[in-house]
Image: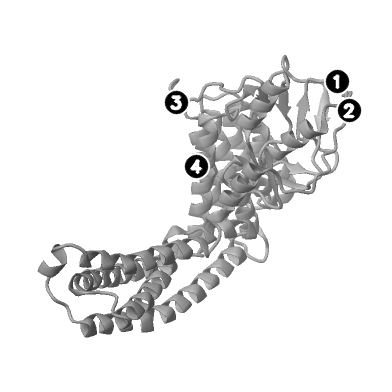
Amino acid sequence: MPQAALIFGCCKVGSMKARFIRYMLQLHQRLWARPLLYCIVAVFASLLARAADYGALGALLPEITPDTIETLLTIISSSMLAVATFAVGSMIASYASASASATPRAFTLVLADDVSQTALSSFIGAFIFSIVSIVALKTGLYDRGGHFVLFILTLAIFAWVVLTFVRWVDNIARLGRLGTTIDKAEAAALASLKARRLMPFLGGVAKTSANTLQGTAAFSARIGYVQYIDIKALQHLAEEHDLRIMVDAMPGAFLAPGRPLAILDRPGDIDEKVAAKIADTFVIDGNRNFHDDPRFGLIVLSEIAARALSPAVNDHGTAIVITGRFVRLFAAWAEPMKKDEVTEEKYDRVIVPPLSLAEMFGDAFTAIARDGAGIVEVGIRLQKAFVSLSTLDCPGFHEQARRHSALALDRAKDRLSLEDDFARLQKIARLLT
């Protein structure tokens, strides 16, 4: 392809908007984010009780002695810090277990567990609330109304902490277990697949053989994975400079030297400032994420199955379970959609390639077929999965199911020691013809 390469040499992470998007994508993976929010709320709640002292309502409220409130707050302050420390230790142990038993790529899913983050945030927030309230009590900040409201808040927070602790204990017993990690990986993959089904081309124009651009290739000096593309910003740039832009690196693609971000319908060079703005619309980081990358969830599940099939683990059942999860995920992808559910094209100057069904099948089934080739139980489940997927009324499914069924048979042919086992696989595979 004749191209005039544009090497974007800027070392910045990107534009302010791209940096904000990248930050928001990673915020739910930070343990400090939610506890910080709860601490801020706790401080405001403690000071909010002072508002009850203004107006005539405060004089009508029941009188609560400061000593009673201080006793309750002291109990909370002395226990919550120890409980929070215990919670952190338990969560770290669960994270290590998830990485060891499943795959390190699943760590972010366990780290983003809402129940654990809510529990830790509640414990720290209750501690901060008690400390701030004790200081306010000792300085005489509250009158009669403030004492009553603070007393009610203290009881409410105490009840909230107890309920949160009970819920968290039940959750921490499962967090980090292989089954829970598989559930989280499937849920993340399903959410990403459903989001892509609603916007298959991210709001742009579908790439076809008729509109494939041959022009200037736009590159980035950064090396890493594409996490997010601001299609709206690309549309504005295309309108402003009378361009058509074809995205070449979708979310999940690895950007290495020589891999273009996009192709422009312009021969020769364009202004470096325009080139830099185009590069800034791509959020690039060192790791893939589940949100805008449907294939990543399939890869993580496949890695879990591959580890289970390794000689060190020898857990065939997990591979069989994950094969069933893949059938469920692909069935959700193939489910017919109503016309009003699909987002129409909004950005007519941005051409976006579709998600490759062949690559999705490869991400899901290649590792299981390779590592489970010598295990007849895994082979039978795979062939039955391909038979099920071939019946789905979706373009390309029958073709991909037949292709991977044949590949799995070829792998199993040399690995299965008994001809009868291979014959069982062949019998199921014939149902695809």
Name the amino acid type tagged 2: Ala
Frontmost of labels 4 and 2 is 2
Frontmost of labels 3 and 2 is 2
Mark 2 neighbour density, 10 Å: few (under 14) some (14–19) many (20 or more): some
Earlier-in-chain disc, 3 versus 2: 2
Kindly report the distance in space between the C-alpha atoms of the residues bearing marks 1 and 4.
40 Å
Which residue is tagged 4? Answer: 191
Q: Residue at 46% x, 65% y: name it.
A: 35
Along the horizontal axis of the image, is 131 left or right of 336?
left
Earlier-in-chain disc, 1 versus 2: 2
Kindly report the distance in space between the C-alpha atoms of the residues bearing marks 4 and 3.
15 Å
| Contact between labelled residues 2 and 1, with CB atoms less than 8 Å apart | yes
Which residue is tagged 1? Answer: 267
Q: Is residue 114 above or below residue 223?
A: below
The one of 296 and 101 positioned closer to us in this rendering? 296
Name the amino acid type tagged 1: Pro
Mark 4 neighbour density, 10 Å: few (under 14) some (14–19) many (20 or more): some
Name the amino acid type tagged 3: Glu
Name the amino acid type tagged 4: Ala
Asked which secondary structure carries label 1, the reply is loop
Which residue is tagged 3? Answer: 341
Q: Is residue 286 above or below residue 39?
A: above
Which residue is tagged 2? Answer: 4
Earlier-in-chain disc, 1 versus 3: 1
Q: Position of residue 188 (x, y in %)?
A: 52, 47
